[in-house]
Image: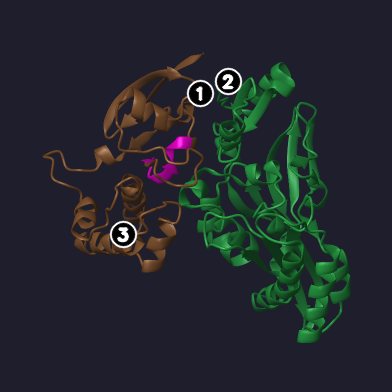
Chain colours: A green, B brown
Amino acid sequence: MIDYDYRKPGNLEEVFNLLREYGPKATLVAGGTDVMVKIKNTKKAPEILISLRGLKELCYIRKNGDYHIGALTTHTMLEKSDLVQEELTALYEGASRIGSVQIRNVATIGGNICNAAPSADTAGPLLVLDAQVLIEGPEGKRRVPITEFFTGTYKTVRKEDEVVTGLQIPVEMEQFGSAYWKQSRRKAMNLPIVGIAVSLRLDNKTISESRIALTVAAPTPIRAYKAEEFLAGKPMDDEVLAEAGRIAASEASPRDSIRGKEWYRRDMIAVFVPRMARLAAERR
Amino acid sequence: MKKVLVSFTLNGDPVTADVPVTWTLLKTLREYFELTGAKEGCGVGECGACTVIMDGQAINSCLCPISEVEGKSVTTIEGIAHKDGSLHPIQKAFLENNGVQCGFCTSGMIMSSKALLDHNPDPTEDDIRKSIAGNFCRCTGYVQIVESVEMAAKEGE
């Protein structure tokens, strides 16, 4: 019999108190689309689930200097936000391709990154948008670049007594165009076979700066730094982009799985890095 | 097993459930309120047979811990027909277009369609397909289902 307690605190202070009291026996839950599924599938539950859905103040999308997104913001809110669609387009594309309407209505961006699946659809976009993860604990606040947030498959730097409260994206990203491609067999209710996100800034027809992120391409979502370095200062032409795709494919370390073979994932990275770079450039 | 008292609005009426804290909204609907229209298919948020509308949004009730329903307004398939028993336009459209085959997905399909039409009374075919992408019909009658929603949208004009 699966048994657990379920608590829904109204503020962060109460969350910290419960985390202090229960420690490793507690699991944080937001939309529940990963946590509840895991409990059902494994028939194992923590002693207590601490729901963050009572923290209404962590539900926001704002541009105020930088871009600010609360951890409890749902994928539906991201999908419907004109600001996200127009200025953080890769994130719009990631958020709108997760699960189904029913999933997106409850699943949160904080949950998506804290679950830390190698396939997380918002991770690639957040990596190319240079997001910082805002983390709060009993000892105070800290911020971690998303590039350092994922430490392994389903593992992050978040400590047991901490809560991810939001994301901050630098205002400089408004000069970048961005795009995300989720390669999957179906258009909905599917995990990516591989995910490719690109953001870039053009100076005339030269790529002044770019970021490339890959998901399901390694144990964690990754940046393809060598491909980014290669692109810096290069013209936006087919040969350059194709070479960047090949470099990115060589930086990945995908595995064979039921969803796709290693060679296929590498091939798709080589194909979609150039396509997403073109799309990102059009958006700037 | 710890129990909770959860008060919410169910199909327009104020209700209180006294159930184990581990129960989902789906289990509470089916086993406490004996409303068996919402079905358990996969139980993990993939098939959509358990779809209900909570505060205007379609959700998978199989993944919704009952504590999250406190103070909310929930509408199930049992709550959309008119008080005199006549069917909701979406229900009528499903009947007229053969949008129902075995019937297992139908409650969820209709609730997802209702959530769509409540927000967007004039959807494109693409809007309809996206909004029922999380509802699986294993009789594979999707064309008739999409046509049913299109008809319901037209009737609603």
Callout 1: SS? loop
- On the image, the x and y values in percent for residue B68 come to 48, 30
Going by the numbered disc 1, the residue's amino acid type is Thr
What residue does disc 3 label?
B145
Please name the residue shown 68% across and 42% down the image: A115
Q: CA distance from mark 3 to mark 2?
A: 39 Å
Which mark sits nearer the N-terminus, 1 or 3? Answer: 1
What residue does disc 2 label?
A4
Name the mark nearer the viewer: 3 or 2. 3
**Residue B116, image quadrant:** bottom left
Residue B56: within the magenta? yes
Q: Please give the chain letter of the residue carrying mark 1.
A: B
**Residue B11, image quadrant:** top left
Residue A275: within the magenta? no
Q: How many marks?
A: 3
**In which quadrant of the rendered image does the N terminus of chain A lie?**
top right
Toward the viewer: A86 or A43? Answer: A43
From this viewpoint, is residue A279 visible? yes
| C-beta proximity under 8 Å, tags 3 and 2 | no
Q: Please give the chain letter of the residue carrying mark 2.
A: A
Question: Residue reaching furthest left?
Answer: B84
**In which quadrant of the rendered image does the C terminus of chain A lie?**
bottom right
- Residues in magenta, as a range: B53-62
| C-beta proximity under 8 Å, tags 2 and 1 | yes
**Residue A204, image quadrant:** bottom right
Main secondary structure of the magenta stretch:
strand
